[in-house]
Image (cartoon, rainbow, N blue to C red):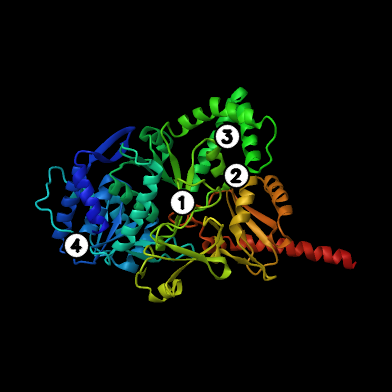
Amino acid sequence: MTFLEQIFANLDSSGEAVVLQELREGQPVPLTARQLLAQVLVARAYLRRLRLKKGDRCALLAHNSMQWVAMDLAIMAEGLTVVPLYARQAPAELVAMMKDCWPSVIACGEKTLADAIVEAWPEAPPSFCFENVFTAGREPAESPALAVTEDDVVTIVYTSGTSGEAKGVMLNAGNVGHMLGCTSARLDQLMKKHPDQDAVFHYLPLCFAGSWIMMLTCLLRGSKLTLNMDLAKIAAEMRLAAPDYFLNVPALLERMRKAVDEQLWKTGGFPLKVYTKAKGAWVRRQEGKGRAGDGLWLGAANRLVFPTIRKKMIGGKLRALICGSAPLSLETQLFFMMLGIPVLQVYGLTETTAICTMDDPDAPVIAGRAGPAIAGVEMKVAENEEIVVRGPNIFPGYWGRPEETAKVLRDGWFHTGDQGEVDANGNWKIVGRIKNLIILGSGHNIAPEPIEDKILHELPDAIQVVLVGNARGYLAALVTGKVSSEETQAALDLVNPGLPHYKQVRAFHLVEEAFTIESGLLTANGKLKRDVIAERFRREIDAMYEVSKNRASKNSAVKTA
């Protein structure tokens, strides 16, 4: 039984239970399992009228919606390959992906998206909009059999393309089915066979692999998945949804932590005193340096302050936060643990069907680690501390790129490009990315991420820190956000003494505007395009090293004189 058969069988048995809802103007707009199945059948009938062939690609370009879910399921059910695209991405980048896989048709959530593609690509394949498919009153005439087998490629998800060029990751029904079994089993542990329907809040774009797997898992489990339709309203809507759990990226959790700190500073008085004392006590306890009286402050905070924070921030019934896409800062994970909210980390790549490791809800959460490998998946550390993986979750290859596929799939192992370490209990920690390694002129190899995180910790008003220094004599940094030179230097003065000489950052350049997806300096899921940044700021980077060189020459001249 394929994962699609399982999902459709579950929807059929769920009947009038609400499985999806959109939040619009603070009000839920629900869709029952029966209504979702009807929408899928309507979409399937529309696709069949287009006379597409099994295996044809169908691009799906739309913002999150219940219709997105119905169209995604319909495309796969018809034996077509869905190519989900990020609606916020620049049209030129979207066109490059579509030219790579050349879809037979483009399904667009709205006309403006279709028009933008045609403007950038006049020769684009034909497109249609959701409003032409989900016409009011249209009823499906039949319920055809599913046209999917375990080996069929059901989706091509384009990778982030941190080096500038995205690759299409093919995932087959077997990959997805295995992953849904693993994610559902972990959620069974978290919910402990709770008889009520899972309530799940969702704000991440459904076109991303991890987000898509969460959505499919919810449909498989019969959960009630509440879709956020306006990112500016996430805080209010997550409270309205009252979720048991939901998927996050580190950036949101870090913003939530900072917002709590800022609000308490504004409030002041006794709540701030209790919070500050308890926070210090909590940190000392984690470091094994507890003092007399720490327990009293933590007890007071657990009675008087933390419950209020939890209720205002997320609501009353949350069991856990789930976090993926990038390592979560230790400070932020410990903050939520202090509030009594477990943060379960997940590690994976699109090529591993989004997931390799997941924190075990029944085991103690190890802050800073992303849990053990999931069932059926093997992981080990290879050359250069690279994580390699094998199992039924590994993708069959990149679309149309056999040479690129051969580079990463070797002897049955997928080479992730990530550097990691594993503890005695099998819990993994991601320490860097091989392609991001900076190789100084001295030959030292440096993973930039840990150092960037340290600087950001000491420079809370900064948005991004990007280290540079390939083939140079030392490290320098680009720092974005509204920070001063004095603040940045003070942060470096705190960080540098704790680092070996070759890892110390000796120059910096301030960039007031943050790097964004729209500027082309971040990938669709918010990762730094380091090569693009280095090229865009080449003049500024050269200037940092030129100033230092001139300074050194003057010092040399003085000494000689």
Task: Out of 182 and 339, give the one closest to the viewer.
Answer: 182
Q: In this view, does 445 lie to the left or right of 326?
A: right
Marks 2/3 in contact by CB < 8 Å: the verdict is no
Return the residue at label 1: 324
Query: Callout 2, which amino acid?
Result: Lys
Q: Which amino acid does label 4 sit on?
A: Ala
Of the two numbered discs 4 and 3 on the same chain, state the one appearing first in sequence. 4
Q: Distance between the residues labelled 2 and 1?
A: 27 Å
- Left or right: 27 in relation to 558: left
Q: Name the residue under label 2.
A: 482
Q: Position of residue 424 (x, y in %)?
A: 56, 57
Q: Is residue 378 above or below residue 139?
A: below
Q: Nearer the viewer, mark 2 or mark 1?
A: 1
Q: How far apart are marks 2 and 3 (CA)?
A: 19 Å
Disc number at residue 424? Answer: none
The residue to which callout 3 is attached is 261
Could you tell whether 89 is left or right of 504 in the image?
Answer: left
* Residue drawn at the location 73% of the way across and 60% of the way down: 501
Give the alpha-carbon distance from disc 2 to disc 4, as whole Å: 54 Å
